Amino acid sequence: MLELQTLYFEDLTIGMQETLEKHVSSSDVVGFAEVSGDRNPIHLSEHFAARTPFKTRIAHGLYTASLISAVLGTRLPGPGAIYLSQTLNFKAPVRIDDKVLVTVRVEELLERGNRARLSCVCSVEGTVVLEGEALVKVPSRSEDL
């Protein structure tokens, strides 16, 4: 679990980045299926998944995307950040027991509205599995949280 770090708009600089590494367990995928309601057997049944192009169970794409949210909400920029938008481009599957490396990087700072544009990349063993861009509203030191 990531330790909370609060960064204000004034603390951010272009190029700042944070990472998270997460081992994807079977219980993570089962839990995400329960919470999301997505019970597609490609995520839950090894027998079903064996007949797919992936040959084994894969994690939900939005489970992987939720790891980006973990970084945004806890580290960069952290508590108080408000998600405004997110693009997601799925490049490859994430399998049970994979270690996903999530990297979030500040690409642009927009003073009007205290917004930050962040690149978001998830990879497994050097292969990009998900990439996108987030736009977040970042608290200012002058605002009360």
Image (tube, helix red, strand yellow):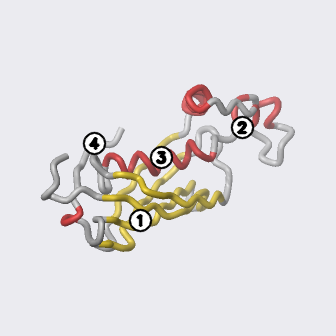
Between marks 4 and 1 in the image, the one whose residue lies nearer the viewer: 1
Please indicate whether residue 23 sits to the left or right of residue 71 in the image: right
CB-based contact (under 8 Å), mark 4 and mark 1: no
Report the amino acid beneath label 3. Answer: Leu
In this view, 80 is above or below 136: above
Which percent across, then down, holds residue 44? 70, 29
The 10 Å Cα crowd at callout 2, few under 14, some 14 to 19, many 20 or more, is many
Which residue corresponds to mark 1?
118
At numbered mark 1, what does the secondary structure look like: helix, strand or loop?
A: strand
Please indicate whether residue 72 sits to the left or right of residue 64 in the image: left
The 10 Å Cα crowd at callout 4, few under 14, some 14 to 19, many 20 or more, is few
- Dot 3 or dot 1: first in sequence order is 3
- Dot 3 or dot 4: first in sequence order is 4
Q: CA distance from mark 4 to mark 1?
A: 20 Å
Report the amino acid beneath label 2. Answer: Arg
To which quarter of the image does residue 136 belong?
Answer: bottom left
CB-based contact (under 8 Å), mark 3 and mark 4: no
Badge number at residue 57: 2
Q: How many marks?
A: 4
Report the amino acid beneath label 4. Answer: Glu
Q: CA distance from mark 4 to mark 2?
A: 30 Å
Report the amino acid beneath label 1. Answer: Leu
The 10 Å Cα crowd at callout 3, few under 14, some 14 to 19, many 20 or more, is some
Which residue corresponds to mark 4?
3
